[in-house]
Amino acid sequence: MTHPFEIELETILPASPEQVWEAIATGPGIDSWFMGRNEVESHEGGIAAMSTGGHREEAVITAYEPGERFATRTPAAEDGRFMAFEYLIEGRDGAGTVLRVVHSGLLGDDWQDEYDALRRGWPFHLHTLREYLTHFPGRVGVPVFVVAPTGGRPEREIRAALIRGLSLPEPVIVGARAHAEPAGLPPLDGEVVWSDDERVEVRTSDGLYTFHHGSGVALMFHHLFGPDTEQAEAAWQQWLTGLLG
């Protein structure tokens, strides 16, 4: 049985409507703060695609009004499930830009868990968008995605391992300094800018680094703006695998 849902959020971003549009309605812009590697055809009826960990998901662009409105909808699955996203942009004279996000659709039998995960995730994603527009405006991020199974170990053990790997004390608080040394890359030295029960985000001078755990896996979603990105995914995979080994 499917269940309808809708999540609506609004935030004020420190950027112009044009900058916000580039961030939410272009492939390179989405790469710089959301998930996966993205492609966006710049017209209504075109395709918006996201590739994450070898999985590609496509959606049809249902609205394309530059600087104002961008919307997509995935094809319906056999049981009717689908996802729809709508972004509404409104400029404010001298006071940034208001972005309203509406995420709706139909969820499957495990709808409550799915809904809770989406509801918890969106404030974090909008926070990352704000970090991007504040600290890396006009730059294009390289997305790095890494995943490792946790072997059924308790969530508290996985979190403890990630926190130790980042040289952080528990509890992790915003403003704490993080340090990690993935082999073959410059050391990560940065500030915690988000911390909750599932994820920690660290901002450095050259990137936004997210460390996430849940549902039997540990994940990393990074957005890198520096020159040392070519070997980053392999290096962080080695770091995470070694941490959980």
Image (cartoon, rainbow, N blue to C red):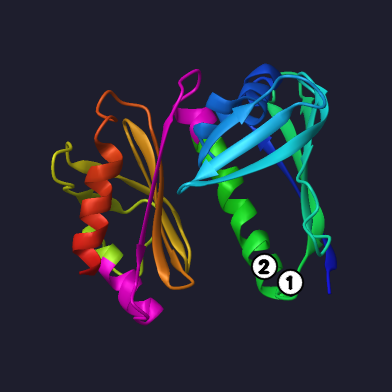
Query: Which residue in the structure is indicated by mark 2?
Result: 114
Query: Which residue in the structure is indicated by mark 1?
Result: 111
Q: Residue at x 53, y 25 (%)?
A: 28
The reply to whether callout 1 and callout 2 are in contact (CB within 8 Å) is: yes
Q: Residue at x 65, y 31 (%)?
A: 24
**Residue 97, percent from left and from top:** 71, 28
Q: Give the magenta range.
A: 132-161
Q: Is residue 178 magenta?
A: no
Tag 1's secondary structure? helix
Q: Residue at x 62, y 65 (%)?
A: 117
Task: Identify residue type, mark 2.
Answer: Glu
Considering the image in quadrants, where does the C terminus appear? bottom left
Q: Residue 154 or 83: which is nearer the viewer?
A: 83
Single out the residue that lies furthest toward the front: 78
Considering the image in quadrants, where does the N terminus appear? bottom right
Estimate the spatial distance between the alpha carbons at disc 1 and disc 2, rounded to whole Å: 5 Å
